[in-house]
Image: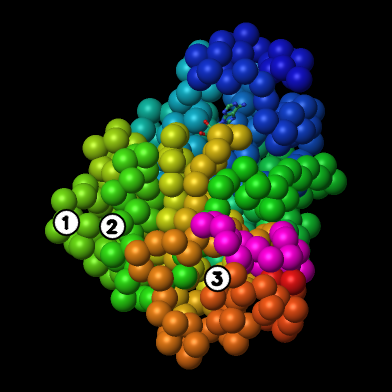
């Protein structure tokens, strides 16, 4: 399938060529024709699948036709609501890229920065507005934004909106939209609550769904290190000595944890920066810019700050701490291995994180290869005291006799081999 077959107009095809896109991704192939037919869409897709272009391209095409038919002052005809500033900026960058030959104008509004530049851009007139909910409501209340001309509304990352407590803000925005409009609804997961929201705002939607999470994970080379909490920092430093790890995104659970790691890394001479909610918007943007440009080798991030970060050529994702929500693991490692490229995801697991690991394995439905040959293995005592009994036995090398019990096998977790703990340097977190 080519972009030409999707009946895209020349200015957009040329822009896609400039971007170096040769063919649509599955979500684009499914969504673009539906959106071009003015249908509502319920899309189940996460970042990394090409979902931004899946809605941006047809919106640009529909609005280009619309602009040709009704010249006049620019009104906001499409609104894209997204949960984080980083995502908003990335979506705006996509509209800049794909819309460069269309003459359509867009702008982006988000909180945490002065609104002046944003209101100035709005006053000049835009066709497309990309916004986070809080700042949008602010600007609506101040009458800088009017939504009565909206023809196409996109709710991006609906599940994250819910997680982040934005649902009431989202509903307030939706209440101001014209009833007659096209609505595109995207979410990485389709929990009952999400579907309930979708049902209230979509009209006879076409459903599209791509890459079940495990498939996305398949493209990424994952590995797992058992390590004591106190040794994680040393293990990270050890791994960073590998020069092939040219750009690593390290995840921590807390902002404080992120700052602490950066301090330690900088102390031993690595270029590292943190990105989290306590940093100013400028500091976050600069950190991201430095990281993208290759000036900073390690970016240490919390989940919310990193959500949707789109970095080409991100070679490694490192889970310094495992997330409590297993889906977050999939989101985190999805920052690497983008658009079909391969990536490497390394996870540290200490004695207290066995529960999280179990949930992750259950979700992804496959084992994560375990690396035992590293300078900071968990001590036998710690394994004996803290780990479930079976892991303790399995951890000792060449001990096939312990593989019979399955009491600690995560549910839904398929073993890769019957004696995956013995011998090899890389082993599989899997027991029969
Ligand atoms: P997204 O899922 O929207 O975050 O997109 C993930 C990444 O895929 C971004 O870096 C896009 O630039 C890239 N991308 C989107 N569509 C295509 C395509 N058809 N071919 C190659 N790369 C793409």
Residue that numbered label 2 is attached to: 237
Q: Is residue 5 above or below residue 166?
A: above
2 or 3: tag closer to the N-terminus: 2
Q: Is residue 379 above or below residue 85?
A: below
Q: Is residue 264 visible?
A: yes
Query: Residue shown at 53%/22% (left/top)?
Result: 98
Q: Quadrant of residue 420?
A: bottom right
Give the x, y percent position of residue 329: 55, 61
Disc number placed over residue 268 in the picture, else none: 1
Q: On the picture, is 297 further left or further right than 326? A: left
Asked if the magenta segment contains residue 54, the reply would be no
Camera-side residue: 218 or 125?
A: 218
Camera-side residue: 351 or 405?
A: 405
Marks 2 and 1: in contact by CB < 8 Å?
yes
1 or 2: tag closer to the N-terminus: 2
Residue that numbered label 3 is attached to: 397
- Pointer 1 residue Cβ closer than 8 Å to ligand 1: no
Q: Is residue 35 visible?
A: no
For label 3, the SS is: loop
- What whole-number distance in Å separates the C-alpha atoms at marks 2 and 3? 26 Å
Q: On the picture, is 291 further left or further right than 84? A: left
Camera-side residue: 128 or 235?
A: 235
Q: Is residue 332 above or below residue 421?
A: above
- What whole-number distance in Å separates the C-alpha atoms at marks 1 and 2? 8 Å
How packed is label 1: few (under 14 Cα within 10 Å), some, or many (20 or more)?
Answer: few
What range of the chain is rendered magenta?
Answer: 412-430
Mark 1, mark 3: which one is toward the viewer?
Answer: 3
Asked if the magenta segment contains residue 414, the reply would be yes
- What whole-number distance in Å separates the C-alpha atoms at marks 1 and 3? 33 Å
Q: Is residue 266 above or below residue 193?
A: above
Marks 3 and 1: in contact by CB < 8 Å?
no
């Amino acid at each position: 399938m080519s972009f030409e077959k999707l009946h895209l107009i020349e200015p957009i095809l040329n822009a896609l060529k400039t971007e170096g896109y040769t063919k649509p991704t599955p979500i684009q192939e499914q969504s673009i024709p539906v959106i071009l037919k003015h249908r509502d869409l319920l899309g189940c897709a996460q970042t990394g699948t090409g979902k931004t272009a899946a809605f941006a391209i047809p919106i640009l095409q529909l609005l280009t036709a619309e602009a040709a038919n009704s010249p006049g002052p620019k009104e906001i005809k499409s609104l894209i609501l997204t949960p984080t500033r980083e995502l908003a900026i990335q979506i705006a960058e996509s509209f800049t890229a794909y819309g460069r030959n269309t003459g359509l104008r867009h702008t982006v509004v988000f909180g945490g920065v002065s609104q002046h530049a944003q209101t100035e851009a709005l006053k000049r007139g835009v066709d497309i507005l990309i916004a986070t909910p809080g700042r949008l409501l602010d600007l609506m209340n101040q009458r800088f934004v009017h939504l009565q001309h909206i023809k196409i509304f996109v709710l991006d990352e609906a599940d994250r909106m819910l997680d982040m407590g934005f649902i009431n803000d989202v509903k307030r925005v939706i209440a101001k939209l014209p009833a007659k409009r096209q609505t595109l609804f995207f979410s990485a997961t389709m929990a009952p609550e999400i579907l309930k929201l979708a049902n209230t705002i979509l009209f006879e939607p076409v459903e599209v769904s791509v890459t079940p999470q495990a498939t996305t994970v398949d493209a990424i080379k994952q590995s797992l290190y058992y390590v004591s909490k106190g040794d994680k920092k040393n293990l990270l430093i050890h791994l960073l000595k590998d020069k092939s790890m040219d750009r690593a995104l390290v995840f921590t659970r807390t902002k404080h944890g992120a700052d602490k790691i950066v301090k330690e890394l900088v102390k031993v001479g690595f270029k590292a920066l943190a990105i989290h909610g306590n940093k100013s918007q400028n500091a976050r943007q600069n950190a991201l810019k430095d990281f993208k440009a290759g000036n900073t080798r390690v970016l240490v991030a919390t989940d919310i700050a990193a959500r949707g970060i789109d970095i080409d050529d991100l070679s490694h994702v490192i889970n310094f701490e495992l997330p409590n929500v297993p889906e977050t693991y999939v989101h985190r490692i999805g920052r690497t291995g983008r658009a079909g490229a391969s990536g490497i995801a390394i996870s540290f697991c200490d004695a207290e994180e066995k529960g999280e690991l179990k949930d992750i394995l259950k979700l992804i439905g496959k084992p994560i290869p375990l690396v035992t040959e590293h300078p900071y293995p968990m001590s036998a005592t710690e394994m004996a005291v803290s780990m479930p009994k079976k892991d303790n036995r399995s951890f000792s090398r060449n001990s096939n006799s312990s593989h019979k019990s399955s009491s600690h096998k995560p549910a839904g977790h398929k073993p890769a081999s019957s004696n995956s703990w013995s011998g090899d340097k890389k082993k599989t977190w899997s027991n029969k």
